[in-house]
Amino acid sequence: MVRVKIRLASKDKSIETVALANSGYESETPQILIPTELAKNIGLWPPLGNVEETEFETAGGPLKVWIIPGGCKVSILTEDAQSSEIDADVVISPLADEVLLSDKMISELAIVLEDAGRGFWRFRWEQAGKLRKSHPPKYWR
């Protein structure tokens, strides 16, 4: 599994955390799924304004979520580089305890999953031999 350190910014708040690059999380737009606890910390819970309540189909069954279109900006942070800041739709999940990046978000952040099982990745613009190591998980409970 590949986990990357990110900065998530919404309105006048930002937070650094770790997100799982989940290529199995398919989306039409760049999306970041965040637990309710993180949404509270960044001022997105309870959701107000332009919010869509919907259900995602998951391996464990239907999951009720709230989507805030363009609700945040996301960038990857490393010791020696930073990605561009990407506009993302925020998906708030009351069951999740970890931040997830959708397939479209992974692409927009220029993440290349080199060896998911060993946790190696790189930025698209870096040489193939440049491997970055996955971060340990950060759980929001």
Image (cartoon, rainbow, N blue to C red):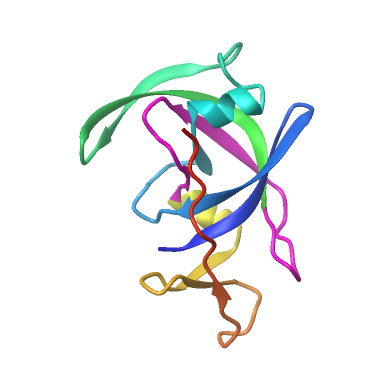
**Residue drawn at x 53%, y 17% as measured from the top left:** 51
Task: Farthest residue to the front: give it.
Answer: 141
Location of residue 83 in the rendering, given as x and y in whole percent from the top left corner: 70, 59
Location of residue 52 in the rendering, given as x and y in whole percent from the top left corner: 47, 18
**Residue drawn at x 73%, y 36% as measured from the top left:** 14
Foreground pick, 77 / 55 = 77
**Residue drawn at x 52%, y 48% as measured from the top left:** 138
The quadrant of the rendering that contains the N terminus is: bottom left
Location of residue 12 in the rendering, given as x and y in whole percent from the top left corner: 79, 27
Location of residue 100 in the rendering, given as x and y in whole percent from the top left corner: 46, 45
Residue 70, above or below 98:
above
Residue 8, above or below 121:
above
Magenta residues span 76-102
Residue 130 relative to residue 98: left or right: right
Task: Farthest residue to the right: give it.
Answer: 12
Foreground pick, 44 / 27 = 44
| Residue 80 part of the magenta segment | yes
Foreground pick, 30 / 72 = 72
| Residue 54 part of the magenta segment | no
Residue 80: quadrant of the picture: bottom right
